[in-house]
Image (cartoon, rainbow, N blue to C red):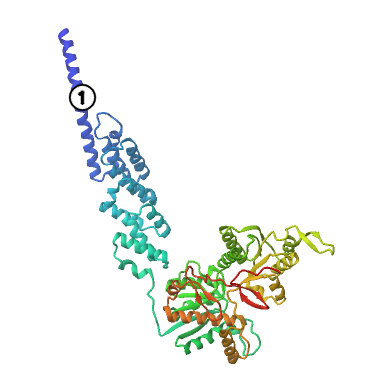
Amino acid sequence: MNTNKSLVIIIILIGLMISPALMGQDFKRQYRSAREFFDNKNYGLAMEAFKPLIVYDKDNSFLEHSSFFYALSAYHQKFPAVAKDMLTQIKQLYPDWNQMPEVNYWMAKIYFDQRQYFQAMQMLGEYPALNQQKNVLEMKEHYLKEIEDVEVLRMMWEEHPEDVVVAKLLAKAISKQPFLDQDAQLIDSLITKFNFDRTEFEASLKPVNVYKEEYVVSLLFPFLAKSLEPTTSTKVNQSILDLYLGIKMAVDTLKTQGINIDLRSYDTERSSAATNALLEMEELKSSDLIVGPLFQNQTKLVQDFSINNKINMISPVSNNTEFIGPNPFALLLQPSNETIGIRSAEWIAANIPNRNCMVFYGEAAKDTVTAASFLKRAKELELNVVLADKVSRENSVSIFNKLATPVEYDEFKNPIEFELKVDSIGSVFIASDDPILYTKVISGVDTRGDSVIIVGGESLLNNAAANFDTYERLHITMAAPTFTRLSSPNYKRFRKEFIRKHGVMPTENSKIGYELMWFVGHNLKSYGVYFQEGLKEKSLIPGYLFKGYDFSEGQSNQFVPFVHFIDGEIEFAESPPRPIK
């Protein structure tokens, strides 16, 4: 009995000693079998074979590898969620595994498949050496080239500024867009930093500037030619015809100066359909400059044409930056509504000691834009806006009430103090062309009799009922980009020639048309087809009839002159207002 019992014990001990070895061989055999399924692309069978091996066992030396190939089998079986969960588990349980970069590679691939580009890049970024591998570079280019939004690529580049694939795709994406100066500078820096082939990008960055003996300028105006009658009476679109007469006369003047303009006129008929038909004409693509359109519903059509064909377009009359939109080839001859608001705040801050001001604006969209720009700049300049009020025409009496509601009278019943105390504010800015609004402001300030200065737009000059003596007495100041001194030699020459040719006095639109063509003609001669590049180098360019232009910081004229009355004459307000006597 003792002998048998001893034998059993020996057998058990031998079994315990050889069991780990036997188990290890079993794990190895299972792993080889599972890998054979995987290598033969039998991914379903591979998943089943790897499944027992991913359960923790201290004797299983194939745990990490089995988990990894189980995840890859799931991926190839189109179970990305299962694969991602398993790879995530590997990262959490075995962070020191020597094949962790490979885990991150497949995590990145799953994220790329799901278009979670930033997460994918984060996975690759955890192991910088990965980004040097050819297969990783190819994977990134394959997936990231799907991104069409330049701003998404720009954000990615900001997060990964050393990534050559992201940098190149960003440069390519930008080069396919209309050029902007800051983008051109970015592409140039990327080309230099990563030693890219410059020829891949240069053709798309900027159109090649061209100097010509004759420039083609196309007018897209609502001439309404079909409705015109050969009479001397005022036409329904007389303002458009006046604009055209000024442009045409300037073309003749330029020719005597050796500047040749081929002026072509197209009738948009105030119709989007008619405008679209014009843009389909092949001859319009030979334009060096398009003037117009003059109606907002046609702007987008011409913008697209301008961008696609890299042809400059300019508006002679608009202050609306929607004319420019995303188009680097668009220009406004006039200052934008935003610029007028900004420059008005700057003029008040520089010239009126009392920094308290009020703002009134109307219901028109441009009034809101002008007022908002004024308020933003006023805050930056530390002006104290005590009131900013949007006023309807029906409620315009509220302006007078806020400015001139009396609370104290003298012995003759004349108001001497108001709810808004005398000299408590230094200025009132009117962000509107509505004569009802600025009439109420003028009436209120006049009633107060204090030192308030009114600042508004040059439309105040066009009010038939305006009393210019009051304007001078109140030192009313106006932003006036199209103001021309009647006594200026240039205006006298223009007026004389216009009367000689057409037998009538030139209108405001005739003056604007002449100025536009004079300005673009001389700049085409000086700087070529893309003359805006030359304009950026000049801080102030004198006009012929108008005061001047500044395109150094934008696509609209940044220069806004101000005028007021002195001794019965309108003069440029280049010095602070004189003290009220």
Quadrant containing the C terminus is bottom right
Q: Nearer the viewer, residue 263 or 528?
A: 528
Say which residue appears at 66% left-offset and 87% top-offset: 233
Q: Could you classify mark 1 by the number of other residues whose Cα lies within 10 Å: few (under 14), some (14-19), or many (20 or more)?
A: few
Q: Nearer the viewer, residue 336 or 133?
A: 336
Left or right of residue 118: residue 541: right
Q: Quadrant of residue 475?
A: bottom right
Left or right of residue 34: residue 398: right
Q: Position of residue 491 (x, y in %)?
A: 58, 84
Residue bearing mark 1: 19
Q: Position of residue 276 (x, y in %)?
A: 50, 75
SS for dot 1: helix
Say which residue appears at 31% left-offset and 59% top-offset: 193
Asked if residue 472 is positioned above or below residue 511 in the image, the reply reads: above
Q: Nearer the viewer, residue 538 or 231?
A: 538
Say which residue appears at 56% left-offset and 61% top-offset: 377
Left or right of residue 487: residue 277: left
